[in-house]
Amino acid sequence: MFPHLGRGLGLRCEHYRHVVDTRPNVDWFEVISENFMGPGGNPRRVLEAVRRDYPVVLHGVSLSIASTDALDDGYLDALASLSRDVEPAWVSDHLCWGRAHGINTHDLLPVPYTEEALGHVVRRVDAVQTRLGRRILLENPSSYLRFRHADMAEPVFLAEVARRADCGILLDVNNVFVTAHNHGLDPSAYLAVLPAERVGQIHLAGHTIEGPLLIDTHDQPVRTEVWQLYAEAIARFGPRSTMIEWDASVPAFEELERELDRAAHWAWVGLGGRERRHAA
Amino acid sequence: MRPEGAARPPTLAAAQSALLSFITGGAPATEPCEQLIAGDDRASAGARIAVYAHMYRARLAEALTSQFPRLARTLGPETFGQLAARYAEDHPSRHASLRFLGQHLPGWMVANHDGAPTDVGLAGLEWARADIFDLVDEPTLTADAVRAWAPARFAELPVRLIEAHRLVTVPAGTAARWDTLVVEGDGEGEASGPGAAGTAPESLVVWREDAAVYHRLVDGDELLALELAARGTAFGALCEGLLSTHQEADAVTKAYGWLSTWLGDGLLRAA
């Protein structure tokens, strides 16, 4: 359903020059769609240069697919235009909402997992896919709360959206771990519900422990427990395009490359290799 | 089936409205939170909502800090954070991109900030700089192209500023204040030029050349000429605009000087 691109990184402004000048040994890059929707300037120049040498994936944070506000036509126009220009391997966003009454929180807010919400999201995914002329992927968000009236588990909801709307799943393994911890759930059981054929990409990132809750901060290395869950996901779903997200306290590019080496190791573990100490 | 007498579950729209108000509206009352959100031994409903409320405020403050780095440096993180929170209450983000978050801050500060006038000036100058970083790239007019223009038709030479520019007028001392503040990510430093004497507001032209954003002070005559060029004019019209206050020879000399400067700056769109 989605091509296997190998190991990728999120393209962040701290590394623009390094990537353009040195063309590092990375299979592909994911970019935040909203950061490249302006018509010119340095962001678009960098994106064009990177696209000449690498496959690129567009990853959005503002589609607000579950919002009860109308879909943002201006945003969709900009996304469609960017998609035509970049010709990404795919386009993704999150199973969440961030806008209501015209106000953007710029956050990935959780959905009440109900039949009403399911129908609503499916209709909107269908509309977006028609508008973009391509199948999209939706990512499971990290969450810190759940609605009392929810009558479905998140992975059941996500799997059903993917099936009914014929879209893909961007599986964020760190988000599964964070969400499962915060709500006292079993992350392995979460993975077991997802349809393998719909999982097109995997995200990995670091999180922070804040008292009783885990917060998805993207500001540190992937934790060992998340690597183990990643190996489990690879064992269950097979090799998948995998990328590292690191958005705050962004380290030197070499540190990200070491994280990709670790990803290769844990994918190898997931595919049946025996765990060994990774040479960083 | 829902037990008789049990409260009807909220619609998706109602649930989103309630959570939005909890997150953006400060500390919500406990009971409505617990009616909507499930708490447990790990964290109460209120504590869980507080995670999102904190992230909302932090994200907006972070975005505004990146758009107004020198203002943030001047005010300090606590005062700037409070200012950002009050601003976000009056001007919540209504665009899908945070890139537009700060567009109303300079005007809002005029009525809502008690600090130094140059604080408002910094906001105006920094927004102008932030607002052009991703505008369209255009080919610029070159000195060679101007030299190739037929001398007999020089008055018809089109003079039009690139889209990636802004003209701003700010309180006296703003440009000098900008120069004294160094923030992370600055290059080798960039002087705005000599500041205006006295307390009269000062005007600046802000523009982008490739990836770099520049600004410099301009006097009243040049500001009027730049406003004309922003709309699109011809070299002859620039000269005519000076004739009410200058002798013809002086006017032409001054207009040639601007043309030379603007070409060097990369301010003019290719004809």
Image (cartoon, coloured by chain):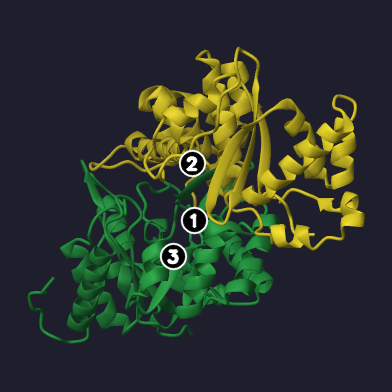
Chain colours: A green, B yellow
Q: How many C-alpha atoms fall within 10 Å of the one at disc 2: few (<14), some, or many (≥20)? A: few
Alpha-carbon distance for marks 1 and 3? Answer: 9 Å
In-front residue for pair B156/A100: B156
> Is disc 1 placed on a helix, strand or loop?
loop
- The amino acid marked with disc number 2 is Ala
Residue extending farthest to the left is: A277
Work out how far the residue at label 2 is from the one at label 3, CA to CA, in angstroms. 34 Å
Circle 3 — which element?
strand
Q: Which residue is mark 2?
A: B6
Using the numbered discs, state the Cα–Cα distance from disc 1 to disc 2 in whole angstroms: 28 Å
Please state the chain letter of the residue tagged with numbered disc 3 in the rendered image. A
Q: Residue at x 39, y 45 (%)?
A: B185
Which chain is indicated by disc 1?
Answer: A
Q: Which residue bears the numbered disc 3?
A: A139
On screen, B16 above or below B222?
Answer: below
Type of amino acid under label 1: Cys
Q: Position of residue B127 (x, y in %)?
A: 58, 36
Q: Name the quadrant containing residue B215.
A: top right
